[in-house]
Image (spheres, helix red, strand yellow):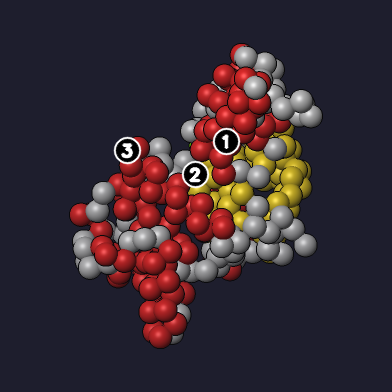
Amino acid sequence: MNKIVVEHLKYRYPLTEKLALDDLSFEVEAGQFIGLVGQNLAGKSTLCQALTGLVPHFYHGGYGGKVIVDGLEVGKSDINDIIQKVGIVFQNPFTQVTGSKLTVYEEIAFGLENMGVPRKEMIERIDHALDLLDIEPYKDRAPFDLSGGQMQRMAIAGIIAMRPQIIVLDEPTSQLDPQGSEEVFRAIQSLSRQGMTVIMAEHKMEKVAQYSDRILLLHEGRLIDDDKPEKVFSRDDLAAYGVAAPVYTQVCKALQAKPAAEPSYPATLDKAYEALAGDAS
Ligand SMILES: Nc1ncnc2c1ncn2[C@@H]1O[C@H](COP(=O)(O)OP(=O)(O)OP(=O)(O)O)[C@@H](O)[C@H]1O
Ligand SMILES: [Mg+2]
C-alpha cells in the first residue's frame, strides 16, 4: 500500500470563504521524495498541516475527503498516533525549540520522554539522530547557542528520534543563510537515501529539482500538476502559477537544448551540462 493516499481533500480555514485546499488527490510511494511548489498562498503549508494532522485537529474549519498516512486516516485518528507515523519541520527553527531544555541532547529527548520511550532505547535513538544529522559535536550546547542551520538540524533530529517513516518539511531553509541551508538540505537528502518518505515545500527550485522524484504544483489550493521535475518545470505556463523554473531549465529552454529523446528540458545542473555538451559536440 502507498505511504500516503490523499483523496478529494478539501479544507477551508475557520471564518473564511475560500477553500485553502480544493479537491486534492494524489498518492506517494514509500521512500519517494516529493517537492511541493507554488506561489505564496498556493496552499503548500496548509497541505503540510493536513498531512500531519494539524489540519483538522488543531486548525478546525471545513474538512472533506481523506488523508491516509501509513494506513492511518488522519482526520479520524488521535494526533498522538499520527505523530508516530509522520513528523513535521517548520520554517523557523526558533519556534520549534521548547525553550525549557538546557542542552541539545535534552531537547532531542523531549519528544521521546512524552512518548514514554524506555531510557535505554531513548539513548540509542538520540545517538542515532545526532549522528544522522551530524550534530553530535554540539550535543552539550545550549539550544539557542546554535547557528540557524544547526538549530534546524536539531529540530529535525528531534523528529527523527521519534522514528516516523514520513517527514514533512515546510520551507525548512527559508530562514537560513546559504551555509545553513546547504547543511540542512544535505541532512534531508541523507534521510531520503535511508528510505524515508519526504515531502518538502520549497521555493528554491534548483534544490527541489535536484532532490525530488516528483513535483506537486499547487495554485490557489488546486493541484495543477504532479509529474517529474523536468516535466513540471518545462511547462510553458509555469509563470502563470507564479513559479520560476530552475535556472538550468531556463538556460536550456532559451538555447533549445534538450536530449533528442526527451520531451522536456533538463532541471538539474548535471542534466543541463549533458544537454549543452551534447549540443556543442
Ligand atoms: N491560519 C490561517 N487562517 C486563515 N487562512 C489561512 C491561514 N493560513 C493560511 N490561510 C489561507 O490559506 C491559503 C493557503 O495558504 P498557505 O499558507 O497554505 O500557502 P503557502 O503556499 O504555504 O504560501 P507561502 O509560500 O506564502 O508559505 C491562503 O489563501 C491563506 O490566506
Ligand atoms: Mg507556506
Asked if residue 139 is positioned above or below residue 11 in the image, the reply reads below
* Res. 271 in view: yes
Quarter location, residue 25: top right
- Say which residue label 2 marks: 170
Judged left or right of residue 117, residue 253 is: right
- x, y percentage for residue 12? 62, 38
The disc, 3 or 1, on the residue closer to the chain's N-terminal end is 3
Give the alpha-carbon distance from disc 1 to disc 2, as whole Å: 26 Å
Q: Marks 1 and 2: which is nearer the front?
A: 1
Query: Which residue is pictured at 76% across the width and 47% down the height?
Result: 7
Asked if residue 40 is positioned above or below residue 198 in the image, the reply reads above
Q: Residue 139 or 50: which is nearer the viewer?
A: 139
Q: Marks 2 and 3: which is nearer the front?
A: 3
Secondary structure beneath label 2: strand
Secondary structure beneath label 3: loop
Judged left or right of residue 279, residue 178 is: left
